Image (cartoon, grey):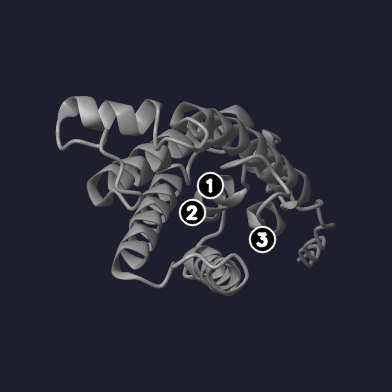
Amino acid sequence: MALTRWPGLMPPNFSAVYAFVFCAGALIPGPRGWVVPLGLLLGTDLVLNGYYQWVRGWEVFTLTGLALMAANYAGYAVLFGLGRGFQRVRRWLGLVGGGVLGAIVFYLVTNTAAWLFNPFHNPEYTRTLAGWLVALTKGTGGYPQTWEFFRNTLLSGGLFTALFAGAWRLTASESPADKGEAPETAPPTEETPEPAEAEA
């Protein structure tokens, strides 16, 4: 998951993060379900932001940058909550559908935040419905259009959810009921014959 976030290794917004957070909510019970993804996200964000700040020379530790990061974590929280809603879904295809739905929701949350905060001061990001639609489709000039980011988010959300859910199904121990088999019954034991009644 961490490697797919590193700049240049994957196409923009093609990441295992969306699927990882969704699948953690759907497949890992208890506190581990949110502690594991949150720890990995915080760790990789610290490394990435340090790289952008001190290697690339971008100003990321600003109020706007921190607000955008908070919006990303709000999107992750929605993804995780959506995963929790899919906890009872054990069919592979159902989980993949949930992962794709989660990628769509994450895209809408984070691009709406980019439109509201407008970190690149794009004059087309007007506070109107038209400006919001520009943020969702065209984006900021000089960068790839946001519909391309959406395509990559959607593809990676579906692909990595399919991989995570498939791996989980192959490795998780299933009960006979989960496999659709009848539960095993205990082998019959030999009954101790009752003592014969004494003859009078």
Mark 3 residue type = Ala
The image's mark for residue 18 is 1
Residue 78 left/right relative to 144? left
Residue positioned 42% across, 35% down in the render: 141
Mark 2 residue type = Gly
Mark 2 lies on residue: 25
Element carrying mark 2:
helix
Neighbor class of circle 2 (other Cα within 10 Å; few <14, some 14-19, many 20+) is: many
Neighbor class of circle 3 (other Cα within 10 Å; few <14, some 14-19, many 20+) is: few
- How far is the residue under mark 3 from the one under mark 1? 12 Å
Instruction: Please determine whether, in this image, residue 30 is positioned above or below residue 4.
Output: below
- How far is the residue under mark 2 from the one under mark 1? 11 Å
Residue 111 left/right relative to 10? left
Residue positioned 63% across, 70% down in the render: 55
Give x and y (percent) for residue 36.
Answer: 56, 68
Q: Which is more toward the observer, 140 or 65?
A: 140
Residue 191 left/right relative to 120? right
* Count of marks, rendered view: 3
Instruction: Please determine whether, in this image, residue 77 is positioned above or below residue 36.
Output: above
Q: Which is more toward the observer, 166 or 41?
A: 41
Q: Residue furthest left?
A: 128
Give x and y (percent) for residue 109.
Answer: 33, 43
Q: Which is more toward the observer, 108 or 139?
A: 139
Residue 27 seen: yes
Give x and y (percent) for residue 57.
Answer: 54, 68
